[in-house]
Image: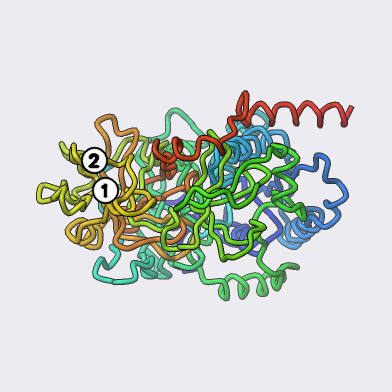
Amino acid sequence: SLLIHCEPVGVGGNKKLKIALLLSGGVDSSVALTLLKSAGHDVTAFYLQIWFQEDFRNYWANCPWEDDLVVAQGVCDVLGVTLKVVPLTNAYWDLVVTHSIDEIAKGRTPNPDVLCNSRVKFGAFREFLATEFPGEFDRVASGHYAAMDRSTVADSDTSTVASVDASTDDRTVASTSTVASTSTDARTYASVDTSTSGLENPTRQTRTRKLVLSGDPRKDQTYFLAHLSQKQLRDLTFPIGGLPKHKLREVAHAANLPNADRPDSQGICFLGKVKFSEFVAEHLGEVSGSIIELETGQKLGTHAGFWFHTIGQRQGLGLSGGPWYVARKDVGGNVVYVTKDNKGVDKSRSTFSVGEFNWISGEVPFSDENGWVLGAVGDDGDDASSEQKVLHPPMAVPDDFDLTAPKPGSNALSSDICEISEKARAAAKASRLFVKVRHGENRYGCTVKLDETGATGVVVIDRDDQGLAAGQFAVFYHENVCLGCGVISEREVPGWLIERDQEHRQVIQGGVRRIAEEKRKERAVRVE
């Protein structure tokens, strides 16, 4: 049962595969290697060098990559596997770090771990294999907590191998996915296409592969894999599936692996010991701007650049008389808005816009003539009353409902009085469509309504979330199948607010990217 995700040789007609495994030095990827070897496959381990140093070299003595490499080699020595080191520092910088800096410059909160998987680990690394080992490997494997559905179910069938109980109130990930269960399933074994070898072989069948939740809701990592394409997913395998951590360590001890008791890593060495504020200052510099009380327009202090602050932030504002919370950011005017009302912070809400979709199947999920996805119909607001100011997302806003004007009797944003109707919330709760807005076991029942082109959409979740941040990924599931993801969109600062606080706005000539480019040139000169 430990090999259910490993396509064991001789079971159900499975053939011996040549597999390139990404080995980090952690116990997860090490056990993945162990299981694949036990399943009878020919495995080569690859360690990816994706750290970067720049001008922070004095900090990097504490970055554990050297230890990771030593441990990885020790694991390979025990298992009799060849280890190859692949330098992908430049790719990591160009494809992940640069993008993260761009997102920060826009006032958004990036997620480099998601992009590292799609652009580097299963992107640049695949290109490396295609160049250095053309046609040699059948699969790329990793130690992610995730599962694959390689069954022969028709591509048009969006149903799943196992269902999530939609009646549960907490909407946590079900822990009984049969794809990730410990019971052997002959169909799972037999359904693997091994008729030809070589990644992206044009003669290979092109059935749609599905990314499925692992059996461990707390450790599940499909959130970080939702940016993958069908082309990438087709040749991937996740040997550990949803095996619980204690079981992984049992396997590691049984195999005498040197890292059997090694603590879990905290992810890729993105910054090492460098503080986030130092990293941002190095790449975007500092430009003084105003800190304004949202409700009154009163200037309370100054900041060094909106890019140092995130929505909901409480610490590090340097203001007295608090607690104060960052409520909004005027990126165009370099203004940071704060409030004492943490319930009024823009992050806490049950609806949000999303765009920049990546659908794993390569196609937009089925939506009806009104844009509702997979039959999860919310509320078009036919019974909405503009007098009651109840907004039934994603209905069209009534003509007399002015979203640019202050709320009557206050200076707060009028959009704050737009409430999700009970009908819309109930539809989200009953839906078989789910969304995660961050890594973890919690996910929300939701409805999604796409625009006419399918490029953007509006999401309603079944209860308020306290941490929605523009730039973060929203990952969608139909029951236990991961459909893909989109990027949470920012909410524009209302025109009346910009007009009210015009004297405090400071437009950065050339934008923040101009500053970033100047800082890059400065670093290049220092290196020379």
Does residue 242 appear in this view?
yes
Residue in the image at 65% along x and 42% along y: 305
Which x, y percent locates residue 484? Answer: 40, 45
Instruction: Assess whether mark 2 and mark 1 are in contact (beta carbons under 8 angstroms).
Output: yes
Number of numbered discs on residues: 2
Q: In which quadrant of the rendered image does the C terminus lie?
A: top right
195 sits left or right of 168 in the view:
right
Front residue (pair 218, 343): 343
Residue topped by disc 1: 158
Residue in the image at 63% along x and 63% along y: 320
Mark 1 and mark 2 lie on one chain; the one further toward the N terminus is 1
- SS for dot 2: loop
The residue type indicated by label 2 comes to: Phe
Does residue 198 appear in this view?
no
Residue in the image at 81% along x and 32% along y: 523
Which x, y percent locates residue 487? Answer: 44, 42
268 sits left or right of 389 in the view:
right
Residue in the image at 20% along x and 43% along y: 395
